[in-house]
Image (cartoon, rainbow, N blue to C red):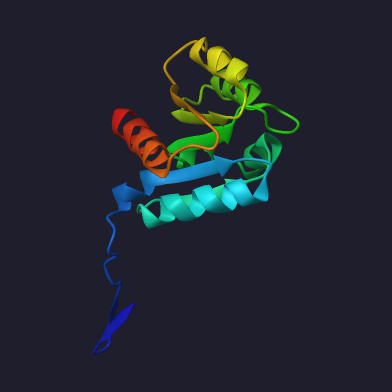
Amino acid sequence: MVRLGREVRPVPSRRPRAAFISDVAVLDADWDVRRAFARLLRVAGYRVRTYRSAEEFLSADIAGAVGCLVLDVHLEGISGLRLHQELAHRHLSLPMVFVTADDNAISAVEALPGHDAIACLRKPCEDAALIAAVADSLAGH
């Protein structure tokens, strides 16, 4: 807020309100992976929220405020694939960038119905590949 005489007006944000759709949620049980992905995406200009599980993400009740999910296929508890189904059941369509160290999981992601899965990247993934996948998911959604 800026005080001009007696009038108080809000200071315009450097980012327009519409840019908030560029929020990205990173879901991975591994703290180091969550931290690395979050840092990388923040440097690329995204607002990032991290979660260690699908249950934590769902309990935060922010799915409608997120533009893209970056998630491990094999999350502890509810898997990334099951989260995809749960969000579809709730009629929430979010673009998802799956990451996995399991080659078999890539086939499972490719077989998902709908077009929410933008990419499935093999861990460890290249920084540029992750940033490009997130950018593609936000551009197409």
Is residue 135 found left or right of 60 in the rendered image? left
Residue in the image at 57% along x and 25% along y: 87
* Residue, far bottom: 5
Is residue 86 found left or right of 14 in the rendered image? right
Vertical order, 9 against 45 (above or below): below
Asked whether 56 or 125 is in front, the reply is: 125
Image quarter in which the N terminus is found = bottom left
x and y percentages locating residue 63 in the rendered image:
53, 37
Vertical order, 21 against 85 (above or below): below
x and y percentages locating residue 85 in the rendered image:
60, 18
* Residue, far left: 4
Vertical order, 134 against 43 (above or below): above
Is residue 28 found left or right of 130 in the rendered image? right
Asked whether 6 or 32 is in front, the reply is: 32
* Residue, far right: 77
Residue in the image at 30% along x and 47% along y: 18
Residue in the image at 61% along x and 29% along y: 101
Q: Quadrant of residue 126?
A: top left
x and y percentages locating residue 31 in the rendered image:
66, 50
x and y percentages locating residue 118 in the rendered image:
41, 24
Q: Quadrant of residue 12?
A: bottom left
Residue in the image at 38% along x and 41% along y: 131
Vertical order, 21 against 35 (above or below): above
